[in-house]
Amino acid sequence: RSVVAMESPWDELTLAFSRTSMFPFFDIAHYLVSLMAMKRQPGAVTMAWKNPFSSWCTAMLHCFGGGILSCILLAEPPLRFLANNTNVLLASSIWYIIFFCPCDLVCQAYSFLPVQLLAAGMKEVTRTWKIVGGVTHANSYYKNGWIVMIAIGWARGAGGSIITNFEQLMKGTWKPEADEWLKMSYPSKVTLLGSVMFTFQHTKHLAISKHNLMFFYTVFLVATKVRLQVT
């Protein structure tokens, strides 16, 4: 008689965590943090009022830059994100209320530290899901091609900063000293580390289950981000 192995409460917790849907709350946090960072850039508010379409395009790069870069690297249509009407409309709505809300109420609410910490932490959760999705997607093209899997996982998780560098270059505001290729930021470094770990886990070189790795890596991301925000 076969014996069915019972999952421990810990495994049930981490497995349930790994199945958490990012839509809509975590996606909202990602868009909010990304677009607030965009608004802080010099001239961003002026451009939104003078040329809303250009501002909207820039906002989409900030929100979906990682997916765009991963599509370019895999020779897929870079505008494929536009097919996800729900997410595009959600990101566009957040862009609109951030830049055009009366009395700047959204930015005033975001200025409270607890709100910033909550949004930043939730955004880091989406980073894990993006890395895992990128690694898995790359493996469907190149079976166990770990270099490609690492590159796509990193691009999906942190590629937004790379894409926005090209956008700044087109506008003439690009600064070489801030280029992600020349001087990687902390989010890019920690995303690269995560991409390596999830790739090795996927290719069975790391003896840990995916849902456990997702849980521990996400806790590390959130705890580190909150600490950086507080200090």
Image: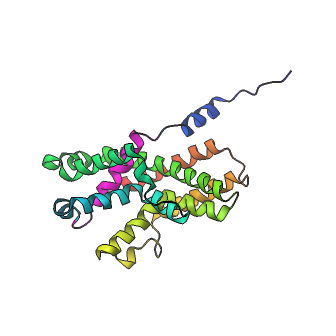
Residue 150 found in image quarter: bottom right
Q: Does residue 213 appear in the picture of this structure?
A: yes
Q: Residue at point 40% right, 39% down?
A: 24
Picture residue at 67% right of the left edge, 30% below the top: 8
Compared with 45, 116 (above or below) is above
**Name of the residue lying farthest toward the bottom:** 176
12 vs 99, nearest the viewer = 99
Q: Position of residue 186 (x, y in %)?
A: 46, 63
Q: Residue furthest left?
A: 103
- Magenta part, dominant SS: helix
Quarter of the view holding residue 229: bottom left
Q: Say whether residue 93 is left or right of residue 224.
A: left
- Screen quadrant of the C terminus: bottom left
Q: Is residue 82 above or below residue 209?
A: below
Residue 57 falls inside the magenta stretch: no
**Residue 85 place in picture, x, y as percent:** 38, 45
Rendered residue at 67%/59% (across/down)? 142
Residue at horizontal 21 percent and vertical 53 percent from the top = 99
Q: Is residue 194 left or right of residue 26?
A: right
Q: Position of residue 92 (x, y in %)?
A: 30, 49
Pick the residue in front: 164 or 29.
164
**Any magenta on residue 24?**
yes
Q: Is residue 58 left or right of residue 198?
A: left
* Residue most extreme to the right: 1
Residue 226 seen in the figure: no
Segment tinted magenta in the rendering? 22-43
Instruction: Give the number of marks.
Output: 0
